[in-house]
């Protein structure tokens, strides 16, 4: 079991990595991961991409499997797609050594797509820093790096947008000025970025713009507005999401469900109960997840179980073959909305269980405030 079995069963050049083959790499040591990295130096870009895409898909499908050591080594891939997929594969890692690596990628990688992926990943760390989960110097380092990218002459728009979103949690005049500039630009991607950044600021000053875009003819803008309202709105804004919960686009409606759970209250609970009967599986599942979250939050403050005495329905299951999901094209991102895959995933944000009922794995956080330097062994 382990690396030797993987190497023996790995397909020839051009072949497809199987579920069984990839699962052998779960939990391998850093030493074995280094050995594997020496093997893949001879792989071409297509093979490396196929390997990491399917490995990431397997990690998402089975919470018992973890491939952190493999993805850490892939950060050093000679292929841009390898580095990009490695960053994405470490989405559950919140260890401090990642801050330096991500900043380096965002500021200096030769690939626009890698720099953009790194800026997106940094948003996770800025949120934690804003909550006081990292040292103040880490927060300052993140903010300085993001502002440097925002002001870098000639930086590509995609990287700049992701940097603004990451920096938004820190607020400040620089962030506000850029949001104000992006919102009326007329460029859908710029407006999406502005709306998403508004939500991350947690500042109610942006409520007029967010409420306005709930009625946008563009579903991507309605989606971002629905998400952001959950971040900066209050219980009094629940009814503003009533129509959005019945949006023709199920992704938009699912975003509304998630936001209703954050706004809370009896009206939100009633709307979500109705949404569990939606004809769209995505919406019904999002409503059930939202009710589940409200129930967990309710239990923190009340002795009575459930949500207002009403137990949510079980989330809709998924009978797909796991290998079918792992064959996705790495260049096919689905919807063109940069945050479309975040709206109905309550697992990371609310600490809920995966589809198989097993708690999702999360990265360990190094809270040793006395350790001024990052451990070299963590950066290998």
Image (cartoon, rainbow, N blue to C red):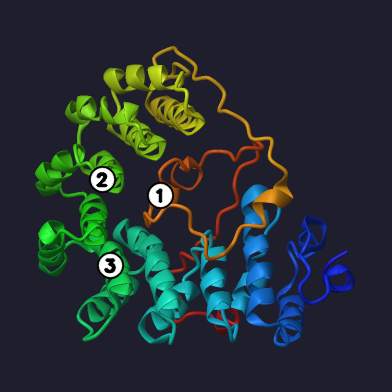
Q: In what element is the residue under mark 3? A: helix
Q: Where is residue 55 in the image (x, y as percent from the top left)?
A: 67, 62
The residue to which callout 1 is attached is: 340
Which residue sits at x=56%, y=64%?
A: 330
Out of 72 and 227, give the one closest to the viewer: 227
Quadrant position of residue 228: top left
The residue to which callout 2 is attached is: 218
Q: Is residue 353 above or below residue 328?
A: above
The answer to whether residue 12 is visible is yes
- How many other residues sit within 10 Å of disc 2, few (<14), some (14-19) or many (≥20)? few
Q: Which mark is residue 161?
A: 3
Out of 343 and 278, give the one closest to the viewer: 278
29 horizontally vs 241: left or right: right
Q: Is residue 41 above or below residue 197?
A: below
Out of 313 and 47, give the one closest to the viewer: 47
Q: In this view, does 184 lie above or below 239?
A: below
- Front of the two marks 2 and 3: 2
Location of the N terminus by quadrant is bottom right
Q: Where is residue 300 in the image (x, y as percent from the top left)?
A: 41, 29
Out of 129 and 81, give the one closest to the viewer: 81
370 horizontally vs 377: left or right: left
Q: Where is residue 281 in the image (x, y as percent from the top left)?
A: 51, 30
- Residues at marks 2 and 3, CA–CA distance in whole angstroms: 19 Å
Which residue sits at x=45%, y=49%?
A: 341
């Amino acid at each position: 079991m382990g690396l030797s079995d993987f190497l023996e069963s790995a397909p020839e050049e051009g072949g497809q990595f199987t579920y069984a083959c990839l699962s052998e790499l779960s939990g391998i040591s850093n030493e074995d991961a280094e050995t594997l990295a020496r093997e893949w130096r001879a792989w071409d870009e297509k093979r490396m991409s196929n390997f990491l895409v399917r490995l990431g898909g397997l990690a998402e499908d089975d919470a018992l499997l973890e491939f952190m050591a493999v993805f850490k080594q892939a950060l050093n891939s000679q292929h841009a797609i390898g580095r990009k997929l490695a960053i994405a594969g470490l989405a559950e890692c919140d260890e401090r050594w990642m801050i330096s690596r991500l900043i380096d990628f965002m500021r200096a990688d030769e690939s626009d797509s890698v720099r953009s992926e790194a800026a997106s990943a940094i948003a996770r760390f800025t949120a934690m820093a804003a909550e006081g989960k990292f040292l103040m110097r880490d927060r300052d380092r993140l903010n300085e790096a993001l502002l440097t990218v925002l002001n870098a002459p000639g930086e590509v728009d995609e990287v700049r947008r992701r940097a603004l979103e990451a920096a938004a949690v820190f607020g400040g005049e620089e962030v506000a000025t850029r949001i104000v500039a992006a919102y009326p630009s007329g460029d859908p991607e710029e407006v999406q970025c502005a709306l998403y950044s508004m939500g991350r600021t947690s500042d109610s000053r942006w409520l007029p713009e967010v409420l306005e875009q709930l009625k946008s003819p563009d579903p991507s803008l309605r989606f971002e507005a629905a998400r952001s309202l959950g971040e900066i709105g209050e219980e009094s804004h629940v009814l503003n999401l009533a129509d959005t919960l019945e949006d023709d686009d199920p992704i938009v409606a699912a975003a509304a469900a998630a936001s209703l759970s954050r706004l809370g209250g009896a009206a939100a609970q009633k709307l979500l109960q109705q949404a569990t009967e939606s004809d769209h599986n995505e919406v019904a599942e999002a409503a059930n997840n939202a009710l589940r979250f409200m129930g967990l939050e309710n239990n923190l403050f009340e002795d009575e179980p459930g949500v207002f005495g009403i137990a949510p329905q079980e989330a809709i299951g998924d009978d797909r073959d796991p290998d079918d999901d792992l064959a996705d094209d790495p260049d096919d991102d689905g919807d063109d909305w940069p945050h479309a895959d975040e709206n109905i995933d309550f697992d990371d944000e609310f600490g809920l269980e995966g589809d198989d009922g097993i708690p999702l794995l999360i990265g360990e956080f190094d809270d040793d405030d006395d350790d001024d330097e990052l451990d070299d062994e963590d950066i290998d």
